[in-house]
Amino acid sequence: MTIDSNIAHIEPQDRARWPAMRRGWRGKCPNCGSGPLLKSYLKVNHDCAVCREEFYHHRADDGPAYLTILFVGHLMAPLLHLVFVTWRPAPLTLFTIFAVGCVGLSLYLLPRLKGAMIGFQWAKGMGGFASSA
């Protein structure tokens, strides 16, 4: 651990991956767990308001969107099949329920997966996080 301007920074090799990803999932700074990671739905803060860890160099890019599609597809497709085979609802009813479910689950997961991905990058020292100390 090094001290830089009275703020403690953890070296990348000493950073725990799962706690950082959990903090990111909650939308908090992966370093301190207190400051907000996102300032709007998907916009990442420049730095942490509490510990001043910089986030501007993250490289989440399309990763959270791909993971969201992967999770929503793998959850909703079997469920769609199960509901259709078991109850045989009207097509419009089935479409309405699953369209709302897919959109709702996607909107819930996307910012959380983005935060978790940034937490993972921070923990592994990827995308510029290694030189933050």
Image: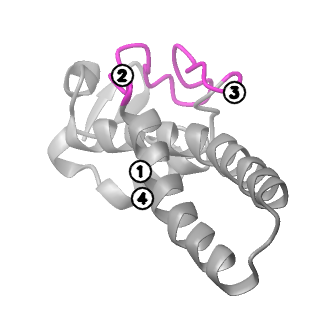
What residue is shown with label 2?
Answer: 58
Circle nearer the N terminus (3, 2) = 3
What quarter of the picture does the C terminus occupy?
top left
Of labels 2 and 4, the one closer to you? 2
Q: Is residue 119 left or right of residue 104?
A: left
What residue is shown with label 3?
Answer: 41
Give the amino acid type for the residue marked by disc 2 in the picture. Answer: His
Check disc 4 and report its element: helix, strand or loop. Answer: helix
Q: CA distance from mark 1 to mark 3?
A: 20 Å
Q: Is residue 58 magenta-colored?
A: yes
Q: Residue at x 40, y 18 (%)?
A: 5
Q: Which mark is residue 70?
A: 1
Of labels 2 and 1, the one closer to you? 1
Circle nearer the N terminus (2, 4) = 4
Q: Residues within 10 Å of mark 2 (few under 14, many from 20)?
A: some
Which one is in front, 29 or 86? 86
Give the amino acid type for the residue marked by disc 1 in the picture. Answer: Leu
